[in-house]
Amino acid sequence: MIPLYFPENIQPGEPLPEVRLPYFMQFSLDMFRPSPAAHRPPSPAGRPALEYPLAPVPRVAVLGLELRQESGVHSLPLWTVPQLARLRPLALAGSWPDLAAVARIMRAGQLRLPELNYPLVVFTAAGSPPLSGERHAQLWDWFGLPVFEQIRTSGGRLLASECESREGFHLAAGTDPGELGALAVPGPCPCGSRQPLFRLAAARALAAAGD
Ligand SMILES: [Zn+2]
């Protein structure tokens, strides 16, 4: 039985009766949202870092990967539209399919990310060719933001990141250039880094690197 009351029958100063919502109105939508904790792998230490191209790292939503927890980095391995809307990221990092999905949802008017105004990071899986010029242009068209590419293993380990000079990639410590099909560019990198610059083979399939 649902208790009902009529406000006009209540005298001034009289305590209001307790109103209980019927059971079918007590469900929160949160009950239908995936719990991130339930999907989180057990060991948080030793996770790969985001290595965002700017410091300090702006509030960035990492889509589809669980990366090291550090200031500004918010990993959303199974991201949802409400999660992104709540986070209000200043930047996004994710694979091409994840970034394309966010763009599609935004263009459909189902998500607004008005604070998104820092460079995007696109993750390319080792074994896949680097992002094509067409896809770079497409991301620019969708987001109006520069994109920096990172080559990672399926487990998220960073193998190479695009240099800010846009001339090629710098390899992460321990990455074997042969594993990536990376060819060293002679001479110093225009970015001023002492790390050698590499070009990645665009056409041929790259060897898949393990974790
Ligand atoms: Zn460089």
Image: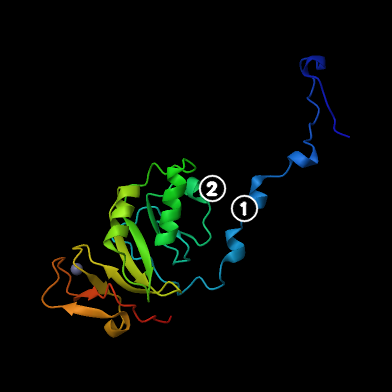
The quadrant in which residue 185 appears is bottom left
**Extreme residue in the right direction:** 1
- Sort mark 1 into few (<14), some (14-19) or many (20+) by Cα contacts within 10 Å: few
Residue type at mark 2 is: Pro
Q: In the structure shown, which secondary structural element does the residue marked by tag 2 occupy? A: helix
Q: In this orientation, does residue 54 appear?
A: no
Residue placed under numbered mark 2 in the picture = 82
- The residue closer to the viewer here, 102 or 13, is 102
Question: Rounded to the nearest whole Å, what is the CA distance between mark 1 and mark 2?
Answer: 9 Å
* Residue depicted at x 66% and y 51%: 32
Residue placed under numbered mark 1 in the picture = 33
Q: Is residue 145 left or right of residue 68?
A: left
* Residue depicted at x 44% and y 45%: 106
* Residue depicted at x 78% and y 31%: 19
Q: Is residue 54 left or right of residue 72?
A: left
| Image: 119 above or below 40 | above
Image location (x, y in percent) of residue 20: 79, 35
Pointers 1 and 2 in contact (CB under 8 A)? yes
Residue type at mark 1 is: Arg
